[in-house]
Amino acid sequence: MENSVALSLQSRALIGSEKLGRRESGFVRFGNGVFEEKAFQTIRVGDQRSKRASIRSGIPDAKISCCCKKSTGHENFHISVDEALILKRKSEDVFSYLNGRCIYLVGMMGSGKSTVGKILAEVLGYSFFDSDKLVEQSVGMPSVAQIFEVYSEAFFRDNESEVLRELSTMRRLVVATGGGAVIRPINWRYMKQGITVWLDVPLEALARRIAAVGTASRPLLHEESGDPYTKAFARLTALAEQRGDAYANADARVSLEDIAAKQGHEDVSALSPTTIAIEALLKIEMFLTEKSKVRNSASIQG
Ligand SMILES: Nc1ncnc2c1ncn2[C@@H]1O[C@H](COP(=O)(O)OP(=O)(O)OP(=O)(O)O)[C@@H](O)[C@H]1O
Ligand SMILES: O=C(O)C1=C[C@@H](O)[C@@H](O)[C@H](O)C1
């Protein structure tokens, strides 16, 4: 990607959080019990100075309500007051441990990286980025599917690595990475500048989610024939086999099967994105506290 080609990073309205600081209250509104997608702000990042200035300058405090309504308008994930409070408390614990480090969510297509990522960004006062969207913007095409078709998967992957490299220089971001970002070792070098979290979702659940919205926007799932669930499941299974343990490089693993078992649910579809976001915060906290214990005992010994 040419430096002169300004790529646009798309960020949430919380882009100004570094200047505004963390809002201690009012980041959830319990009235309607639903999160609401906010308008995205576009900043130019071809020039690193203007990128950082945009992030620092901030925008007026956005009112954040308690619900996540995807832009498709199909889904509403309701959250209870209890869950909202746990989410808030846990985010406060994790915030200080993070010390500004970014969170990179990895996982298969449809694993909920964007949905959960937006919740995490909101409660931490971080900015949210979707690396697929950043690649679309940097290439100047409306969809990943089109980039694959007009150029190639390799071209997409090169641009994806470049986007991750740029993001790795920044702080206080939650990044939903592309499902295949884990296959290139260089991408791990970039993502490991922050904390990496794997959303581990059973393939059946992924296929169900993807079938519900169709496979058109996901080029790697679109080639198979058959009904949407069957083709999504077949292709996801093949991709999971090819990728082997790549996702397991992440610092923290959020297993939906484990959460469901813990909470006595038979099916992971009973788990709301908020529940998953809370578990992600717990796992991040565990990873960071473990790491600081190891560091402390090494400094005592040495
Ligand atoms: N916990 C959940 N329960 C039910 N549906 C969910 C949950 N989390 C996400 N979804 C739905 O699954 C679909 C995929 O979610 P999302 O876009 O967040 O995944 P993603 O990992 O970012 O996908 P991709 O990598 O393909 O962009 C969406 O329709 C979303 O509403
Ligand atoms: O799993 C994958 O390889 C992909 C996932 C999507 O997020 C996109 O990055 C693209 O469709 C490839």
Image (cartoon, grey):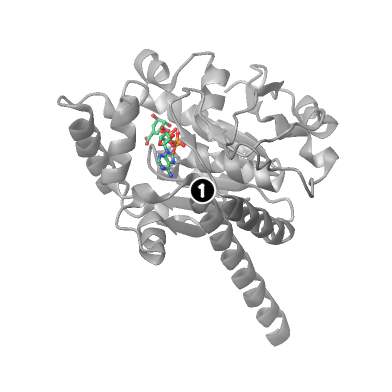
Location of the C terminus (image quadrant): bottom right
Q: Is residue 162 above or below residue 105?
A: above
Please tell me whether residue 140 is drawn above or below residue 175 in the rendered image. above
For the question of whether residue 173 can be seen, the reply is no
**In the image, residue 260 above or below residue 8:** below
Q: Above or below — where is 270 with respect to 86? A: above
Q: Image point 53% across, 48% down: which residue?
A: 274
Left of 137 or right of it: where is 235?
left
Taking depth in this image into account, of 271 and 51 the one nearest to the observer is 271
Say which of 273 and 20 sits in front.
Answer: 273
Residue at figure coordinates x 45%, y 40% from the top left:
181
Q: Position of residue 193 (x, y in %)?
A: 63, 50
Looking at the image, which is closer to me, 78 or 175? 78
- Position in image of residue 89 (x %, y %): 68, 58
Position of the N terminus by quadrant: top right
| Label 1 sits on residue | 188
Q: Please name the residue shown 84% across and 39% down the image.
A: 20
Q: Secondary structure at mark 1?
A: helix
Q: Is residue 108 left or right of residue 225?
A: right
